Image (cartoon, helix red, strand yellow):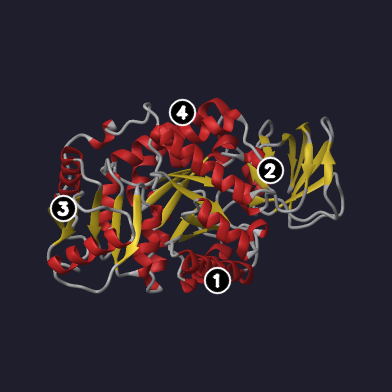
């Protein structure tokens, strides 16, 4: 049985609403399902979450649900119909949510005219359309189209040279967040994070609602890069959101910034997801471009914990093929001689007992040729520690907590499995021994390294290593 280390995040949408398609995506490699709250109603997302839980139960596979909040993104209003902006056309940008003219672009941002200057470049739809500001008269901004393209309702608007006066959560975000918490989402992704306080605000809201939930900070703005380390430390995981990074920064900077974010995440021990346009051509094609395949592989070589599909699975023509292809590329990269099994970010001094124990378990597994590293965990912390220490062998993470098993689906090289509510370590070891044999995962005589916290069942108490011979 082949174990893929890097995890796969797939965005759900109309393309995979059929239960049969979703089930095949789980078989193909889906580990984490992303719910993009920039699109769809609460009813849409609730129905998709129900289908996901049903498919997960049927496949007997733990799958995490990640709620991706819109964040304070500025968007255009509504037009009578989609239309083309032609290079050199004069247009007027106004505050508002709708218009009746193709020469007028409504932008849903109060105080727009006060925040732009003559000469600024306003970008639409992830940088596909550029308008240069010629003058500002009252609340109206006169501009000229420098790079034309299609214009439609609710596309993103960027002012790369300006910091906008807007809070970390919109009213819609707050409503969506409370809905996600009520539905039991396993992760919350916060868009357009600018400082650590943005993450702390979401954490406080989740805790006030009695649903403490891990937070994924999406790094996609210049402010986030400037405050990168404090944001990563405040978060439970981070996402390299390359779509908006590619608008805020020149294209040649994005690969460098990606490596920077991964490096900081690895150093301060947080999982990291690389996202956006990884297999974009597969929204229509049945095979990726060579550059896309290299992009996925290089993210794996670079140390990412997970890679993500967006439109490829949400609205593309081949969601199952795209999922399978990403899994195959990641697995091929991990099995190559170029994959670093002893990365430099796993070196250095451990910062606490759980981390030191996890590193010791990884070293022991390597030295004795163990088949697996086994973690017994209540909260998932034991599994996370050995994942971040980059276990040289697959990690079988046993937990009696269903939500913990789902959250561990994001952890690099971790296979979550259910265990009974036993409280003595000998009973747990004997049970795991039988489970590994019965499932065909291990054979008699093979060694496993076990890591757990003592006393059993106390969250965050990872402090013990044990070697066991399966039999």
Label 3 SS: strand
Q: Residues within 10 Å of mark 1 (few under 14, many from 20)?
A: few
Image position of 286 (left or right of 432): right
Earlier in the chain: of badge 3 and badge 2, it is 2
Residue matched to label 3: 469
Q: Nearer the viewer, mark 1 or mark 3?
A: 3
Q: CA distance from mark 4 to mark 1?
A: 39 Å
Residue matched to label 1: 50
Earlier in the chain: of badge 3 and badge 4, it is 4
Residue 121, horizontal then vertical, whole percent: 67, 34
Where residue 242 sits, quadrant-wise, is top right
For image coordinates 56% across by 48% down, the residue present is: 323
Q: CA distance from mark 2 to mark 4?
A: 23 Å
| Res 125 label | 2
User: Quick check: 31 above or below 297?
Assistant: below
Q: Residues within 10 Å of mark 2 (few under 14, many from 20)?
A: many
Residue matched to label 4: 256
Q: CA distance from mark 3 to mark 2?
A: 57 Å
Earlier in the chain: of badge 2 and badge 4, it is 2
Residue 427, horizontal then vertical, whole percent: 16, 69
Q: Nearer the viewer, mark 3 or mark 4?
A: 3
Label 4 SS: helix
Q: Nearer the viewer, mark 3 or mark 2?
A: 3
Taking depth in this image into account, of 347 and 420 the one nearest to the observer is 420
Where residue 136 sits, quadrant-wise, is top right
Q: Residues within 10 Å of mark 3 (few under 14, many from 20)?
A: some
Q: CA distance from mark 3 to mark 4?
A: 45 Å
Residue 309, horizontal then vertical, whole percent: 56, 47
Q: CA distance from mark 1 to mark 3?
A: 40 Å
Label 1 SS: helix
Give the total of numbered labels: 4
């Amino acid at each position: 049985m082949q174990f893929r280390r890097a995890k796969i995040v797939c965005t759900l949408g109309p393309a995979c609403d059929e239960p049969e398609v979703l089930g095949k995506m789980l078989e193909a490699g889906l580990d984490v399902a992303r719910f993009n709250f920039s699109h769809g109603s609460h009813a849409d997302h609730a129905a998709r979450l129900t289908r996901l839980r049903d498919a997960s139960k049927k496949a007997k596979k733990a799958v995490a649900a990640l709620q991706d909040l819109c964040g304070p993104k500025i968007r255009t209003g509504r037009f009578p119909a989609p239309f083309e902006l032609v290079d050199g056309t004069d247009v007027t940008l106004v505050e508002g949510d709708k218009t009746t003219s193709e020469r007028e672009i409504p932008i849903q941002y109060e105080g727009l005219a006060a925040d732009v200057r003559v000469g600024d470049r306003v970008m639409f739809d992830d940088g596909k359309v550029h308008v240069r500001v010629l003058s500002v008269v009252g609340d109206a901004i006169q501009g000229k189209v420098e790079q034309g393209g299609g214009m439609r309702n609710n596309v993103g608007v960027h002012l790369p040279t300006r910091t906008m006066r807007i809070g970390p959560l919109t009213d819609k975000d707050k409503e969506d967040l409370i809905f996600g918490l009520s539905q039991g989402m396993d992760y919350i992704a916060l868009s357009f994070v600018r400082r650590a306080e943005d993450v702390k605000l979401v954490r406080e809201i989740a805790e006030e609602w009695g649903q403490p939930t891990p937070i994924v900070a999406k790094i996609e703005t210049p402010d986030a890069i400037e405050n990168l380390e404090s944001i990563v430390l405040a978060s439970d995981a981070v996402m390299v959101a390359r779509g908006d990074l590619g608008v805020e920064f020149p294209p040649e900077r994005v690969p460098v910034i990606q490596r920077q974010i991964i490096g900081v995440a690895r150093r301060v021990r947080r999982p990291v997801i690389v996202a956006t346009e990884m297999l974009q051509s597969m929204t229509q094609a049945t095979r990726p471009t060579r550059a896309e395949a290299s992009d996925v592989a290089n993210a794996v070589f670079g140390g990412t914990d997970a890679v993500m599909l967006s439109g490829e699975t949400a609205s593309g023509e081949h969601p199952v093929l795209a999922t399978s292809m990403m899994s195959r590329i990641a697995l091929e990269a991990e099995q190559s001689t170029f994959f670093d099994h002893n990365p430099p970010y796993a070196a250095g001094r451990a910062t606490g007992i759980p981390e030191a124990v996890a590193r010791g378990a990884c070293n022991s597994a390597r030295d004795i040729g163990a088949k697996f590293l086994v973690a017994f965990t209540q909260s998932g912390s034991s599994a996370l520690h050995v994942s971040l220490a980059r276990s040289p062998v697959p990690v079988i993470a046993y937990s009696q907590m269903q939500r913990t098993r789902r959250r561990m689906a994001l952890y690099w090289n971790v296979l979550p499995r259910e265990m009974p509510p036993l409280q003595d370590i000998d009973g747990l070891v004997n049970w795991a021994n039988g489970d590994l044999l019965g499932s065909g995962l291990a054979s008699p005589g093979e060694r496993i390294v076990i890591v757990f916290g003592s006393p059993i069942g106390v969250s965050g108490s990872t402090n013990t290593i044990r070697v066991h011979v399966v039999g």
